[in-house]
Image (cartoon, grey):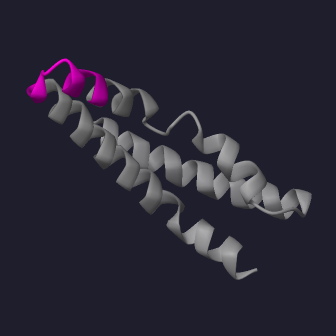
Amino acid sequence: SVVTSTFFSTLFIATSARCFAVWRRCPSMIFLIPGLFPIVPGAGIYWSFYYLFVNNLDKSLDFGLDGCLLDRKVKRGTQGETRRCLSE
C-alpha cells in the first residue's frame, strides 16, 4: 500500500542521510530534509481541502485520511534520526 511504501522509503532516506552525514562530516539534516520533500503528501492535502470546498465530503475524507496516514509514517520513519540530530 501507499502508506507502507512511504514508511519504508522514509526509513531508507533517514538511513542514507545518516551515512552521508558521517561520510561528509556534516549534519544529517542537510541530506534528510531535501530527501523527504518528494514524500510529503502535499497533493493529498490539497485535494482534501478542494473536495471539502466543493462539498464532496466523501472524497475529502478519503484524501484527508490518506494524507494523515502518510504524514504519520514519514514522522515515524525519521523520528530516531531527528532525535539524534537534536541531541548533538
Answer with left or right where residue 27 lies relative to residue 41. right
Question: Which residue is the extreme one toward the right?
Answer: 25
Hey, which residue is sitting farthest bottom in the picture?
87
Q: Position of residue 71 (x, y in %)?
A: 39, 49
29 shown above or below 64 = below
Look at 86% across and 59% down and name the residue there: 23
Q: Residue at x 71, y 61 (%)?
A: 18
Q: Is residue 9 left or right of residue 44?
A: right
Q: Is residue 58 left or right of residue 33?
A: left
- Quadrant location of the C terminus? bottom right
Q: Is residue 27 left or right of residue 68?
A: right
Say if 85 sits above or below 46 in the image: below
Q: Nearer the viewer, residue 43 or 10?
A: 43
Q: Residue 84 lies in what quarter of the image?
A: bottom right
Q: Residue furthest left?
A: 58
* Residue lying furthest top: 54
Residue 73 x, y percent position in the rendering: 38, 53
Closer-to-camera residue (77/8): 77
Q: Is residue 18 above or below residue 87?
A: above
* Start-end of magenta stretch: 49-58
Magenta span contains residue 51? yes
Residue 35: x %, y % from top left = 65, 42
- Tell me what residue is drawn at x 25 percent, y 38 percent: 64
Split into 4 quadrants, where in the image is the N terminus?
top left
Query: Is 18 within the magenta?
Result: no
Asked which quadrant contains residue 22, the reply is bottom right
